[in-house]
Image (cartoon, rainbow, N blue to C red):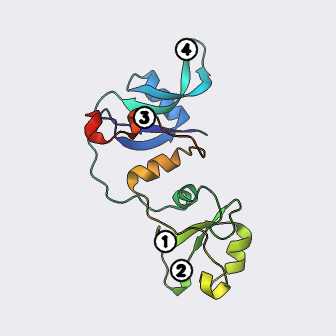
Amino acid sequence: MRETLVLNASFEPLSTVSLRRAVVLVMREKAVVEQSHPGLRVRAAQVELPVPQVIRLRRYVRVPFRQRAPWSRRGVLVRDRHRCAYCGRRATTVDHIVPRSHGGGDTWLNTVAACAADNHRKADRTPGQAGMKLLVKPFEPTPADALLLALGLKEGESLPEWLTLPAAATA
């Protein structure tokens, strides 16, 4: 299912929602479509609208400031673009660089996406102990980065200019 970026009325990213939820927000006139997927449309008996990629709420929603993006297995896979940190193939699992049994935790800097074969080969060891090398260094995405990564833009695709402008320029 497609994910849609939700912007506040002030154009700041809030979250991602399912395509179904995005369509409901637009149909109830709580949001407007800012960018849609080219050539794709949602059709119903009496309505037709573009498939939203980015929607903006009509009314400003006050949200508490969040300094850190919450860690999740899905978030790690999305951050690493479903590529194994050890071999570069398609990743389906999350590997702990320092295993949990050795005191490693579920954190952005201790986890990477890994294919099942490499995760099994590394087992309950650190990459150094297993003779494996990380191709990419894990990083902690900002909450805004996490939202944009969740959109799953393909290599070379970019967001529209109006979305990449600094907040002061859009105000």
Residue 93 on image: x %, y %: 64, 65
Q: Nearer the viewer, residue 15 or 12?
A: 12
* Residue ID for mark 1: 106
Give the CA separation, mark 1 to mark 4.
45 Å
Please tell me which of labels 2 and 4 falls first in the chain.
Answer: 4
- In the rendered structure, are the residues bearing label 3 and label 2 in contact, judged by CB atoms less than 8 Å apart? no
Q: Quadrant of the N terminus?
A: top right
Left or right position of 37 against 88: left
Left or right position of 43 against 110: right
Kind of residue at badge 3? Glu
* Residue ID for mark 3: 161
- In the rendered structure, are the residues bearing label 1 and label 2 in contact, judged by CB atoms less than 8 Å apart? yes
Q: Dot 1 surroundings within 10 Å: few (below 14), some, or many (20 or more)? A: some
Q: Quadrant of the C terminus?
A: top left
Secondary structure of the residue carrying numbered label 2? helix
Give the CA separation, mark 1 to mark 2.
8 Å
Please tell me which of labels 1 and 2 falls first in the chain.
Answer: 2
Give the CA separation, mark 2 to mark 4.
52 Å
Secondary structure of the residue carrying numbered label 3? helix
Residue drawn where x is 33% and y is 27% of the image: 58
* Residue ID for mark 4: 47
Please tell me which of labels 3 and 1 falls first in the chain.
Answer: 1
Please tell me which of labels 3 and 4 falls first in the chain.
Answer: 4
